[in-house]
C-alpha cells in the first residue's frame, strides 16, 4: 500500500482565484495625459513622454509608457483601443 501526501499550502494557493486586473481610465488634456488605475493616478506631460505602446494579450491590455525618468507598464481588463487612439492624436498635435 502506498500513501501520497500533498502539501496543504500548495493546494490552497492553486484554488485561490487571481483578482482581475484594474480598469484603466485615460484622460487626455492639452498639456498631458492622466491615467487612473484603481487608487493610483498618474499625469504625464506630453513633452516628457518618449514612448507609448498598447499591447493586447489574452484578456488583458498592457499600456507601456516611457518618459525621460520612468518606465511604467499598466494593465487593464477594459478595451483601451479607442482611448489609446485619442491619446496618440493628442500626443502628436
Image (cartoon, rainbow, N blue to C red):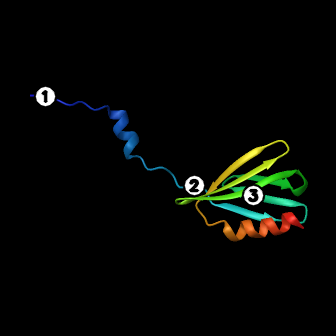
Answer with mark 2 or mark 1, whichever residue precedes in sequence: 1
CA–CA distance in space, label 2 to label 1: 43 Å
Residue 7: percent from left, percent from top: 31, 31
Left or right: residue 58 versus residue 74 is left
Tag shown at residue 35 = 3
Identify which residue is drawn at 67% across, 68% down: 81
Tag shown at residue 21 = 2
* Image quarter of residue 3: top left
Q: Secondary structure at mark 3?
A: strand
Picture layout, residue 37 above or below residue 91: above
Q: Which residue is mark 1?
A: 2
**Is residue 29 visible from the viewing direction of this image?**
no
CA–CA distance in space, label 1 to label 3: 57 Å
Q: Are marks 1 and 3 in contact (CB under 8 Å)?
A: no
Within 10 angstroms of label 2, few (less than 14), some, or many (20 or more) residues? Answer: some
Within 10 angstroms of label 1, few (less than 14), some, or many (20 or more) residues? Answer: few
Residue 58: percent from left, percent from top: 52, 59
* Image quarter of residue 91: bottom right
Q: Secondary structure at mark 1?
A: loop
CA–CA distance in space, label 2 to label 3: 15 Å
Residue 77: percent from left, percent from top: 58, 61
Picture layout, residue 18 above or below residue 80: above
Q: Quadrant of the N terminus?
A: top left
Amino acid at each position: 500500500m502506498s500513501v501520497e501526501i500533498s502539501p496543504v499550502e500548495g493546494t490552497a494557493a492553486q484554488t485561490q482565484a487571481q483578482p482581475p486586473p484594474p480598469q484603466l481610465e485615460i484622460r487626455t488634456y492639452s498639456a498631458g495625459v492622466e491615467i487612473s488605475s484603481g487608487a493610483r493616478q498618474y499625469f504625464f506631460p506630453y513633452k516628457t513622454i518618449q514612448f507609448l505602446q498598447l499591447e493586447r494579450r489574452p484578456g488583458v491590455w498592457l499600456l507601456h509608457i516611457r518618459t525621460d525618468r520612468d518606465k511604467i507598464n499598466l494593465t487593464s481588463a477594459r478595451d483601451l483601443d479607442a482611448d489609446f487612439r485619442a491619446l496618440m492624436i493628442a500626443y502628436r498635435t
